[in-house]
């Protein structure tokens, strides 16, 4: 969430590369309507604020997250090392 003083509230959905996918105006919606919308979109709601988010919902509602698998250096093939360094060079800001 990013609060912008004076701006109408809207939900901005981004992909894993921070590219905007959709923008939904929230100003005419009640809190319960917004909660329903988030549930329909696949967002996970914790029962208590101090609860942990289960691993399977860590990147929800995104599907096929490129961040799910963390390559293990001991099991990675040698030719995969060059593609890893290419990825780091392309996304050095992440």
Image (cartoon, rainbow, N blue to C red):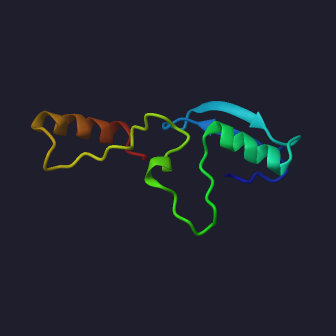
Residue 21 visible in image: yes
The x, y position of residue 5, in whole percent, is 81, 53
Name, please, the residue furthest toward the top. Answer: 21
Residue 65: quadrant of the picture: top left
Is 5 left, or right, of 11 in this rendering?
right
The residue depicted at 61 percent of the width and 32 percent of the height is 20
- Front-lying residue, 62 or 51: 51
**Number of numbered discs present?**
0
Residue 9 visible in image: no
Is 92 left, or right, of 24 in this rendering?
left
The residue depicted at 63 percent of the width and 61 percent of the height is 47
Is 41 left, or right, of 71 in this rendering?
right
Residue 3: quadrant of the picture: bottom right
- Front-lying residue, 58 or 84: 58
The residue depicted at 32 percent of the width and 43 percent of the height is 69
The x, y position of residue 2, in whole percent, is 69, 52
């Amino acid at each position: 969430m990013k609060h912008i003083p004076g701006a109408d509230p809207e939900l901005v959905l981004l992909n894993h590369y921070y590219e905007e996918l959709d923008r939904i105006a929230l100003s005419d919606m009640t809190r319960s309507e917004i909660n329903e919308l988030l549930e329909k979109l696949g967002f996970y709601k914790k029962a208590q604020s101090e609860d942990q988010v289960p691993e399977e919902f860590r990147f929800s509602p995104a599907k096929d997250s490129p961040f799910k698998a963390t390559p293990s250096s001991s099991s990675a093939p040698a030719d995969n090392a060059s593609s890893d360094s290419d990825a780091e060079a392309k996304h050095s800001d992440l």
